[in-house]
């Protein structure tokens, strides 16, 4: 089913006024207004994204209480264990707090859960083992906010517990010495969209202030905090939280830190992937190069190696770990591709992806570590919420599921409505996880699809593209794209501008590229101008678009600067295409 295109109608008066008052180009002013930034002060705040505009860590709910408990534990030489999560956000959060506490002289270790054996969140068996090995204080990062029973178990074991998290909480909160969370009930915080690594960074910042006896930290601790900004940026991009407000500031400055002063492990990973040769890092370099290699470790049960990569100061060990994670990611890509093809076949043979409000797919042999990625790809392809369930993966007792949304469905609410069929669940509106008895999958599928059918209107089952402007290919020069880059870093809630061009032709046969032929590469021409286009994740569309070689096309795309061996050129990332004759009556306009 084709996407609906909406081309913004621009308020020329607002654009002209912002251009004059903020001292920006008309292109930048137009894009800022489209993002709701209409006055000069807000524009400068957005574009400058100054590090000192970060909110004081003491404002984050629970930080002061947590810092007091941790400071006392450090001074009493108590054994502290950081209990992390197995995704890139959880790993970076663990690395930030571990490095901080080591620097402060704490007796500290970390536990990076195994996705297949420990599962998501606090685990009673793991807590029992930590207590048996001398732990006195456990600090969660990126998890724990729904762990009511596990918090009670920790208390029975004599463990003091601090929870730092950013996920959706339930009707009750765990019993803990302190809870650090940007949306803690009754504790308003101006920006509630921090990821786990950013929450850990704020706590580490507060600990450094406490150790320094001042809001202004010592030079040694300041050096650590700048390194931690880089790690927080990595976690922020990897967790796909909105890149606005504090998140934008962290990523904007964290990219510089990762480029200029990365931990040895990240430096080694950048060398192996070749992005160390780039003059500057982008959020896309994190999202498509660094984060997938960290996530591959977590997805395949090796999260502890991802944390070690970011905490080791040994150049030799850093290189070995980087090479291992790089190869592990290659294995993940191959595994993901095979499961994607099988899941797509199941969706098409057993369900109607265009008519059903949601898809719940299940197979006993799927690897639980990659089903979340596949669910996300299918959700994007069919514009439907998708739940992928890997059968009997935890000792034959429970199956594990990952859910990704599309069409506006709140996944957490959906799982709450289906709770009677689930052993456990957690997550947030856009991504969630669950555990379920294999015998309950059919009943859960029916309940989940019924909830989705009630919540998602028919019109919301068609993907929409909100296009910033129409721009012919001839206008795509380095100068114009460099102006657009002033709005970087790009990501969730601040996506790279989406443009369109009409009456475009193929300038040659399209080709597949990348591991498993996942991607598409082609050349497009329009009115004498030609440009290279890449369709990421669209390799399966090769035959479809090749058949249109004699037709005029309308294309939606994001312009980028490709930096290859020191030579810069403009290329476009293809998002959607239509035959020109078909699109004329379908394209609508929408106010900015």
Image (tube, helix red, strand yellow):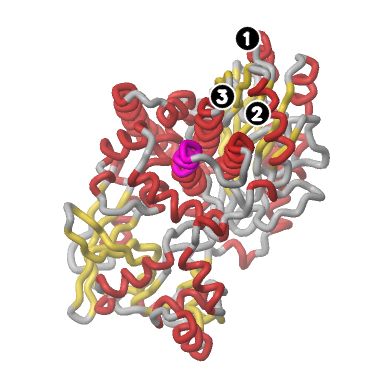
Q: Mark 3 or mark 1: name the one nearer the start of the chain.
A: 3
Dot 3 alpha-carbon crowd within 10 angstroms: few under 14, some 14 to 19, many 20 or more: many
Q: Position of residue 490 (x, y in %)?
A: 44, 59
Q: Give the range drawn in magenta.
A: 219-226
> Dividing the image into 4 quarters, which one contains the C terminus?
bottom right
Q: Are marks 2 and 3 in contact (CB under 8 Å)?
A: no
Secondary structure beneath disc 3?
Answer: loop
The answer to if 225 sits in the magenta stretch is yes
* Residue wearing tag 3: 113
Q: Where is residue 312 in the image (x, y as percent from the top left)?
A: 40, 25
Which dot marks residue 570?
A: none
* Residue wearing tag 1: 133
Which dot marks residue 139?
A: 2
Q: Residue at x 33, y 61 (%)?
A: 573
Q: Seen in the image, is 37 located left or right of residue 71?
A: left
The image quarter in which residue 267 lies:
top left
Distance of label 3 from label 1 (alpha carbons)? 16 Å
């Amino acid at each position: 089913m084709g996407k609906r295109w909406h081309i913004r109608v621009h308020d020329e008066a607002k654009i002209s006024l912002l251009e004059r008052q903020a001292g920006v180009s008309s292109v930048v002013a137009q894009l800022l207004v489209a993002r709701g930034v209409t006055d000069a002060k807000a524009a400068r705040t957005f574009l400058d994204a100054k590090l000192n505009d970060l909110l004081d860590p003491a404002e984050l709910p629970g930080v002061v209480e947590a810092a007091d408990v941790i400071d006392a534990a450090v001074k009493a030489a108590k054994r502290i264990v950081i209990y992390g999560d197995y995704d890139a956000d959880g790993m970076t959060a663990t690395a930030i707090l571990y490095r901080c506490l080591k620097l402060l002289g704490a007796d500290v270790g970390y536990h990076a859960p195994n996705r297949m054996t420990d599962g998501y969140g606090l685990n009673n068996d793991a807590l029992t083992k930590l207590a048996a090995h001398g732990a006195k204080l456990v600090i969660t990062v990126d998890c724990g906010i729904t762990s009511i029973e596990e918090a009670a178990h920790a208390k029975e074991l004599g463990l003091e517990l601090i929870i730092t998290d950013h996920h959706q909480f339930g009707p009750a909160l765990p019993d803990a010495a302190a809870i650090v969370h940007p949306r803690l009930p009754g504790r308003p915080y101006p920006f509630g969209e921090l990821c786990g690594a950013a929450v850990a960074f704020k706590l580490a910042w507060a600990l450094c202030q406490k150790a320094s006896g001042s809001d202004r930290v010592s030079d040694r601790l300041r050096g650590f905090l700048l390194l931690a900004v880089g790690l927080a940026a990595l976690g922020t991009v990897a967790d796909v939280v909105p890149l606005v407000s504090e998140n934008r500031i962290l990523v904007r400055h964290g990219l510089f830190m990762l480029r200029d002063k990365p931990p040895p492990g990240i430096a080694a990973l950048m060398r192996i992937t070749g992005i160390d040769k780039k003059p500057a890092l982008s959020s896309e370099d994190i999202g498509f190069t660094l984060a997938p290699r960290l996530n591959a470790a977590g997805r395949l049960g090796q999260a502890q190696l991802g944390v070690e990569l970011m905490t080791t100061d040994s150049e030799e060990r850093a290189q070995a770990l980087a090479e291992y994670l790089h190869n592990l990611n290659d294995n993940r890509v191959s595994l993901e591709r095979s499961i994607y093809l099988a899941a797509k076949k199941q969706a098409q043979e057993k369900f109607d992806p265009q008519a059903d409000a949601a898809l719940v797919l299940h197979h006993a042999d799927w690897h639980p570590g990659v089903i979340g990625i596949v669910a996300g790809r299918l959700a994007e392809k069919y514009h439907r919420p998708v739940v992928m369930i890997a059968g009997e993966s935890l000792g034959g007792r429970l199956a594990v599921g990952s859910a990704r949304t599309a069409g506006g469905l709140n996944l957490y609410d959906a799982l709450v409505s289906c709770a009677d069929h689930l052993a456990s669940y957690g997550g947030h509106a856009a991504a969630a996880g669950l555990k379920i008895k294999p015998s309950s999958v059919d009943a859960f599928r029916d309940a989940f699809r019924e909830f989705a059918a009630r919540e998602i209107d028919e019109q919301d089952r068609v993907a929409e593209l909100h296009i910033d402007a129409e721009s012919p290919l001839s206008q795509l020069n380095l100068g114009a794209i460099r102006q657009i880059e002033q709005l970087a870093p790009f990501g969730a809630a601040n996506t790279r501008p989406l443009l369109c061009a009409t009456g475009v032709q193929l300038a040659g046969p399209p080709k597949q590229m990348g591991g498993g032929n996942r991607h598409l590469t082609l050349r497009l021409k329009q009115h004498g101008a030609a440009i290279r286009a890449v369709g990421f994740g669209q390799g399966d569309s090769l035959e479809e678009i090749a058949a249109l070689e004699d037709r005029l096309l309308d294309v939606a795309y994001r312009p980028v600067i490709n930096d290859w061996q020191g030579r810069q050129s403009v290329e476009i990332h293809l998002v959607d295409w239509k035959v020109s004759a078909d699109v004329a009556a379908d394209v609508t306009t929408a106010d900015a």
